């Protein structure tokens, strides 16, 4: 192997994530595709990020991996790093002058760090040029989850779509 090759292991997690982002942005820029999805990690969160202070798995950082500390420092460190990988994607899109024609959504599968709950899940929408209104939040109550993302996306784009409202052909209640 030469210096451009690396092992596909947890030890190269961030390097793999940045390479995925580079490939995705190149594909968008070249019009090879109009839609890209990047999942940092695997479906069970059984990955670790060696450059962080916390050396356990992402999944463990969510459930009890903070040694009883109420502010969840391990989960916070993991989410901050994963957010920095999303920032890397956004900066690449900006550098290649395609951020204004691209919508980026970041979400996680957990809303509350100690529960397997899908309510109150944070997510962020950016890009889209002047189409996306900045600083929009949607007050939906505790029953909202990432599966209802279309309602927040509609609000961010200035479309009035009440929470729980059906969208024929797209979202039905």
Image (cartoon, rainbow, N blue to C red):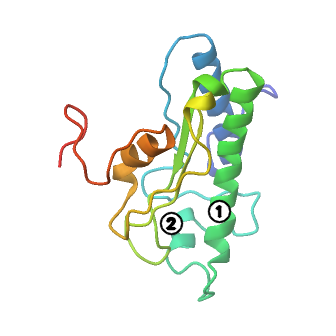
Q: Is residue 115 left or right of residue 6?
A: left
Which residue is at a point 65% across and 47% down the rendered structure image? Answer: 13
Q: Are there few (<14), some (14-19), or many (20+) residues within 10 Å of tag 2? A: some
Percent of width and height locating residue 113: 50, 73
Residue on which disc 1 sits: 78
Which residue is at a point 17% across and 49% down the rendered structure image? Answer: 173
Q: Give the quadrant of residue 1.
A: top right
Q: CA distance from mark 1 to mark 2?
A: 10 Å
Q: Is residue 5 left or right of residue 34?
A: right
Which residue is at a point 65% across and 62% down the rendered structure image? Answer: 78
Residue on which disc 2 sits: 59
Tag 2 secondary structure: helix
Q: Is residue 60 left or right of residue 20?
A: left
Q: Nearer the viewer, mark 1 or mark 2?
A: 1
Q: Nearer the viewer, residue 15 or 82?
A: 82
Percent of width and height locating residue 103: 55, 32
Q: Nearer the viewer, residue 125 or 109?
A: 125
Percent of width and height locating residue 42: 48, 50
Q: Nearer the viewer, residue 169 or 73?
A: 169
The first of marks 1 and 2 along the sequence is 2
Q: Are there few (<14), some (14-19), or many (20+) residues within 10 Å of tag 1? A: many
In the picture as drawn, the residue positioned furthest to the bottom comes out as 68
Residue 31's place in the image compared with 96, above or below, is above
């Amino acid at each position: 192997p030469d210096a451009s090759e690396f092992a596909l292991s947890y030890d190269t997690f961030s390097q793999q994530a940045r390479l995925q982002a580079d490939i995705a942005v190149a594909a968008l820029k070249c019009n090879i595709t109009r839609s890209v999805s990047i999942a940092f990690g695997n479906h069970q969160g059984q990955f670790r990020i060696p450059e962080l202070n916390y050396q356990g798995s992402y999944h463990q950082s969510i459930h009890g991996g903070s040694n009883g500390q109420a502010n969840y420092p391990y989960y916070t460190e993991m989410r901050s790093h994963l957010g920095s990988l999303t920032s890397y994607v956004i900066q690449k899109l900006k550098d290649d002058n395609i951020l204004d024609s691209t919508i980026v959504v970041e979400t996680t599968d957990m809303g509350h760090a100690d529960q397997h709950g899908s309510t109150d899940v944070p997510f962020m929408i950016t890009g889209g040029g002047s189409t996306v209104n900045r600083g929009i939040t949607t007050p939906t109550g505790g029953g909202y989850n990432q599966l209802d993302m279309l309602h927040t996306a509609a609000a961010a784009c200035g479309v009035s779509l009440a929470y729980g409202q059906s969208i024929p052909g797209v979202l039905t209640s």
